[in-house]
Amino acid sequence: MQSFKSGELVLDAGATILVEGTNSPHLYTLLSGWAIKHKSLEDGLRQVLNFALPGDLLGLQASISDTMHHTVEALTGVVLCVFPREKLWTLYESHQGLAFDITWLAAREETILGDYLVTVGQRRATERVAFVLLHLFQRARQVGLVRNNKVTFPFTQEHLADTIGFSLVHTNKTLKQLRRTGCFKWVGTNFELTDEQKLGALAGEPSPIGGVRPLV
């Protein structure tokens, strides 16, 4: 991986990492920080497709289809490991174990997108919000960002609304309903999960987070 890596890149919150419709010469592993993947429509509306957490691989899509079909934006300050895209095929030819790891990450991304599609298309309002909060909490816990059932969520209610396909007002009302269940506390960026089982039931029992994940 040291021979594949070309360096590290540090970006501030709000920086654009990859741009929809462009052809990036690099792949990135997110080493620290949070990012969002989103698509923008001509009328200015935005759909958040997924959140990127440490260990996630960014830019693989452009390696396959030549251009990015979504934008990746830093939610916090981030540190990225930079890989030249042109070396990807050499990695597949010479390092089958690492190639499998990349395929594993791509398959996991597909699973996550499927869960989010079901959430936007079929889950009720409270289920949508509960699913996203629980899913992000569990992903954060998997990469060591949770302490004593507490985690920093760097996204806003507007990001949440753009993820579940609701207006900001509707999202705010739904959050108030969920808060009354006592499953969690969310003040500013500080999120505490107080009853994971109950929140899971409210979320419609989402797919479990997988086991140990590879880091490329």
Image (cartoon, helix red, strand yellow):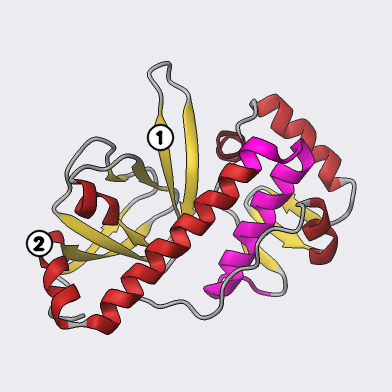
Magenta segment boundaries in residue numbering:
119-147
Q: Secondary structure at mark 1?
A: strand
Picture quarter containing residue 146?
Answer: bottom right
Q: Position of residue 171 (x, y in %)?
A: 70, 33
Residue at x 40%, y 29% (from the top left corner)? 40
Residue at x 38%, y 62% (from the top left corner)? 106
Name the mark on residue 28: none
Q: Is residue 69 magenta?
A: no
Q: CA distance from mark 1 to mark 2?
A: 25 Å
| Residue 68 in view in this figure | yes
Q: Which residue is mark 1?
A: 39
Is 158 located above or below residue 204 in the figure?
A: above
Hey, what amino acid is under mark 2?
A: Glu
Q: Is residue 128 magenta?
A: yes
Name the mark on residue 86: 2
Q: Label 1 crowding class (10 Å Cα cut-off): few <14, some 14-19, many 20+?
A: some
Left or right? Give the position of 106 relative to 136. left
Secondary structure predominantly adopted by residues drawn in magenta: helix
Q: Secondary structure at mark 2?
A: helix
Q: Position of residue 117 (x, y in %)?
A: 57, 43
Please tell me which of labels 1 and 2 falls first in the chain. 1
Picture quarter containing residue 148?
Answer: bottom right
Q: In which quadrant of the rendered image does the C terminus lie?
A: bottom left
Is 151 located above or below residue 169 in the figure?
A: below
Picture quarter containing residue 56?
Answer: bottom left
